[in-house]
Image: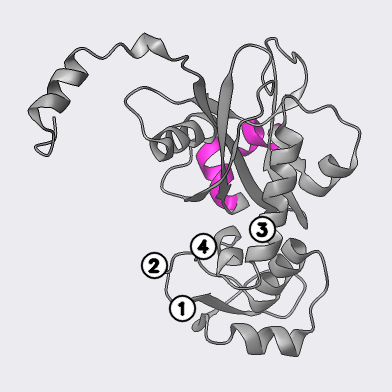
Amino acid sequence: MPEKFTKQDKEFLDNYDSSTYDKPSITVDLLVFTIEDGELKIVMIRRKNSPYRGMLSLPGAFVGMEETLDEAASRGIREKTGLKDIYFEQLYTWGEVNRDPRMRIISVSYMALVSIEELYRAAGSSEISSHLYCVDTLLQSEENIAFDHNKMIAYGRERIKNKVEYTHLAFEFLPEKFTLPQLQKINEILLGKELYKANFRKKIKDMVVETKEFTSGGAHRPSKLYVRKNNNDKIEN
């Protein structure tokens, strides 16, 4: 016990009956975003068990008694995709009383961002490709999505759109070396609008460093490759 506890505190805790209050279960639901074929996509699973058997849902995990929320999210992402040490952030806590028909479950949603190359390396292209769904198509379709996961996806989509304007978020979807047109395209996908080339390059000029390398192969003229100015930069909240 912490040293700041008094004798009375210790006596109280020794005799405390934790069964006095109901104990809801806690889960983490994981929004793993990537970009492929010019679309923002998300990892989804088709449920094999009830409730909502056969419906799409976000991957998730129950939080263990000895885990922090971040540890549970990191474990869930690793178990579902094989990804380790990637950017993720806590989004929102979902606590509607009847959000899960099994029992009282409170869920904390997390957003992870990863390049398609890294996702394929970790999970294997043949294994993960069938689990990738276009976010905007999902939100506009009549596809039944389990629990309240459609609300989570919409919330995550809006968070991305808002944060890309003032953070380095777009770099999380790129390989280590990239072209400026690639970076602009990523920003356009995340924002859902076209950007003027001159204005965009002026905005990001202090975020990137030019390398001496160029793209190779293909029918187009080789493009210069860049890297993020400081690969240790964190996305600001």
Pick whichever of labels 3 and 2 is earlier in the sequence.
Answer: 3
Viewer-side residue, 228 vs 95:
95
Marks 3/2: CA–CA distance: 20 Å
Viewer-side residue, 105 vs 54:
105
Mark 2 belongs to which amino acid?
Asn
Label 1 environment density (alpha carbons within 10 Å; few <14, some 14–19, many ≥20): few
Marks 2/4: CA–CA distance: 15 Å
Would residue 94 be counted in the magenta stretch?
no
Write the residue at 50% across / 25% down. 26
Q: Are marks 3 and 4 in contact (CB under 8 Å)?
A: no
Circle number at residue 237: 4
Write the residue at 60% across / 43% down. 32
Circle number at residue 229: 1
Marks 3/4: CA–CA distance: 11 Å
**Is 168 situated above or below 29?**
below
**Is 41 situated above or below 27?**
below
Pick whichever of labels 3 and 1 is earlier in the sequence.
Answer: 3
Instruction: Identify residue for label 3.
Output: 160
Pick whichever of labels 3 and 4 is earlier in the sequence.
Answer: 3
Q: Is residue 14 left or right of residue 148?
A: left
